[in-house]
């Protein structure tokens, strides 16, 4: 035989359901407020190559070094915003994070708008004075703000400083 037992309701079921709804709403708001990765600048400018110094180049450690860079608009449309390229120089062959955090010198240069498919050369207003230092150096160029293709927003170049390259002037 079956039997039924009557239980007095204390209202705990209503409190449990309300607690579940609060937890669901708070988890959705947490998802909506989570940071997302997105491009800061539309378009795609590419750091193509370092023109001065060239990769693997030997440079006199007594002459100041100016930086020149080739930048290409490899995106699909003309971008009207000026972009800023930061440069960092450090002694040794270092990876990006190590060089940026322990750089010997740094600066920036601006890139004016470039037509689609075109390239331009930019030059830093200030350079680096090695003051007789020797050895391998790492130069990093990077855009301050990422664009739609971040894989070409960073360029690493290594070069060598040597005291043995000097100019000789002969009077005869």
Image (cartoon, rainbow, N blue to C red):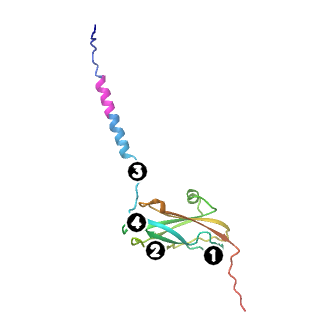
Badge count: 4
Q: Earlier in the sequence, mark 4 or mark 1?
A: 1
Element assignment for label 1: loop
The residue identified by callout 4 is: 75
Q: Is 15 a magenta residue?
A: yes
Q: Which residue corresponds to the image point at 31% horizontal and 33% vertical from the top-left?
A: 21
Q: Crowding near pointer 1: few (<14 within 10 Å), some, many (20+)?
A: some
Q: Whole-Å distance between the Cαs marked 4 and 3?
A: 23 Å
User: Within the image, what quadrant is residue 133 found in?
Assistant: bottom right
- Of callouts 2 and 4, which one flags the residue occurring earlier in the amino acid sequence? 4
Marks 3 and 2, Cα distance to the nearest angstrom? 32 Å
Q: Nearer the viewer, mark 2 or mark 4?
A: 4
Measure the alpha-carbon separation of dots 1 and 3.
45 Å
Q: Is residue 45 magenta?
A: no
Residue with the mark numbered 3: 36
Local crowd at mark 2 within 10 Å, few (<14), some, or many (≥20)?
some
Specify which label sits upstream in the sequence, 4 or 3.
3
Task: Name the residue beneath numbered marker 1.
Answer: 63
> How far is mark 1 from mark 2, CA to CA?
26 Å
Secondary structure mostly seen in magenta is helix
Mark 1 or mark 3, which has the lower sequence index? 3
Secondary structure beneath dot 3 equals: loop
**Label 4 secondary element:** loop
Q: Position of residue 80 (x, y in %)?
A: 36, 69
Left or right of 94 in this view: 24: left
Query: For the magenta stretch, what is the residue range?
Result: 12-21
Which tag is nearer the camera, tag 4 or tag 1? 4
Please tell me the numbered disc located at residue 120: 2
Residue contact at pointers 4 and 3, CB within 8 angstroms? no
For the N terminus, the image quarter is: top left
Would you place residue 13 above or below residue 138 in this image? above
Residue 163: name its quadrant: bottom right
């Amino acid at each position: 035989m079956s039997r039924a037992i009557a239980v007095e309701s204390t209202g705990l079921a209503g409190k449990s359901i309300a607690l579940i709804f609060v937890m669901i709403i708070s988890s959705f708001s947490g998802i909506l407020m989570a940071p997302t990765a997105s491009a800061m600048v539309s378009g795609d400018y590419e750091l193509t190559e370092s023109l001065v110094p060239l990769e693997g180049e030997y440079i006199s450690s007594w002459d100041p070094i100016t930086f020149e860079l080739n930048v290409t608009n490899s995106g699909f449309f003309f971008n009207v915003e000026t972009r800023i390229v930061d440069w960092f120089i450090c002694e040794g062959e270092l990876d990006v994070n190590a060089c940026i955090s322990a750089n010997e010198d740094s600066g920036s240069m601006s890139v004016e708008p470039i037509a689609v498919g075109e390239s331009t050369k930019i030059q830093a207003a200030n350079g680096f004075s090695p003051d007789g230092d020797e050895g391998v150096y790492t130069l990093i160029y990077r855009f301050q703000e990422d664009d739609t293709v971040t894989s070409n927003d960073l360029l690493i170049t290594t070069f060598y400083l040597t005291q043995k390259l000097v100019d000789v002037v002969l009077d005869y």
